[in-house]
Image (tube, rainbow, N blue to C red):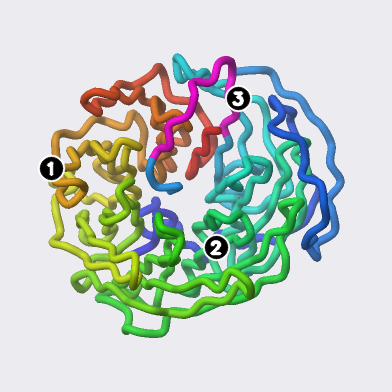
Amino acid sequence: MGSGAGAAGGGWSRRRFVGALGGAAAVTALPAPAPPRSGSGPTATAPDRATAVTEQPSAEPSAAQPSKKASGPRPLYVGTYTSVEGGGKGIGLATYDSETGRITGTGTLTGIVNPSYLALHPDRRTLYAVNEHDDGAVTAVRLADRKILGARSTGGAGPCHLSVHPGGRWLLSANYASGSVAVHPLGDSGALGERTDVVKHSTPSPGPGQQGPHAHQFITSPDGGHVLAVDLGTDTVYTYRLDTRRGTLTEVAQAHTRAGAGPRHLTFHPGGRHAYLANEVDNTVAVCTYEASTGRLTIGEPQSTGSGSGTNYPAQILVTATGSYAFLANRGDNSLARYAVEADGARLRLLDTVPVSGDFPRQIAFSPDGTLLFAANQKSGTVSVFRVDAKNGELRLAGEPFASPVAVCALPL
């Protein structure tokens, strides 16, 4: 089973997403975030790419973190595949209205191959993207002027997820095709240093129908004491301790799903004692308990995704900042499932599903204030926006979906 870009993703396989890093970067100006950081830090071995400005006509963390309501247009970045027919040319640039949810396209940041997943530095000054191809890499982009700061190898193939450690000094990435996780240091400028560690998942053996490990996500626990890697191929969530001085990983625990579940995405409840696991292959979700002192995760019984009788591959689950509701993206059923979170996070109760107004929702994300939910629909090449009712968690579609080639990740700022 592929991870959204594989058999489930219209017959594509991750091995088709092969490209070479390089080329010029074309940048469309957006409202600038904070100015670049001062100071020196690691710089990428890849040379800085020439940057040109082009204009086009206007057209986990896991839980939403509420912030003061912003006025005016807000930046939105869209990840895609550049090496497939009909794919994008790089990272899509857009803005959205925080009141109406309306998205306006503004251009493309080119020169980045297969930026299928995006993450933001905690200080909001640097954007990171995976380069999902056989010779996997991660790329850093300074947001103030959209300058590409260079790329570093992940030491594996097909990286599909990345996140920034809360301290802002380490980038964590997951190599799907090779089943490994990697760590890179981050300098004061936001640039990437040479990889400090890469660990391949060798045990347990792959689950039914899997030919090897397939790391799908790499995140930090809410307490900051551990980092957790979700592996679809081995039906396992691995817990590591990250040495924040050396950037090395030490495995401390494993949590196993039932055979063939194919775990894909984990998100924590704001309380920090529970988490929710989306299992791609057997079309289930599960409530997990987390022990901060040991890093041990315990996976509960599988539950319904609310999908119909057809084939469905759950992709990602989110939890509101209040911890009251959770939302699951269903690829195949093309719906968003809404759950009530009960018993201080220990229980999920399925409430309903709503159509995603797109095809194959690969990824979902909250706006920073939690009032909007964005769904990147891979097969329809659209981004749907929903208003989130703070009182009951109901989702209401906010206008027509925004067209964006092979949209696989939407990152609203």
In the figure, 50 relative to 207: above or below? above
Q: Amino acid at mark 3?
A: Gly
* Residue 68 part of the magenta-drawn span: yes
Write the start and end of the magenta stretch as one range.
64-76
Q: Amino acid at mark 2?
A: Leu
Instruction: Specify the label residue 105 is tagged with.
Output: 3
Horizontal and vertical percent for residue 269?
Answer: 30, 48
In the figure, 31 relative to 190: above or below? above
* Residue 356 part of the magenta-drawn span: no
Horizontal and vertical percent for residue 4?
Answer: 40, 54
Magenta: main secondary structure: loop
- SS for tag 2? strand
Residue carrying label 2:
172
The quadrant of the picture occupied by the N terminus is bottom left
Of residues 400 and 98, which is closer to you in this image? 98
> What distance separates the C-alpha of mark 3 from that of mark 2?
29 Å
Residue carrying label 1:
349
Residue at (30%, 63%) from the top-left corner? Answer: 263
Horizontal and vertical percent for residue 213?
Answer: 40, 75
**Relative horizontal placement of residue 387, taking residue 40 as reference (left or right):** left
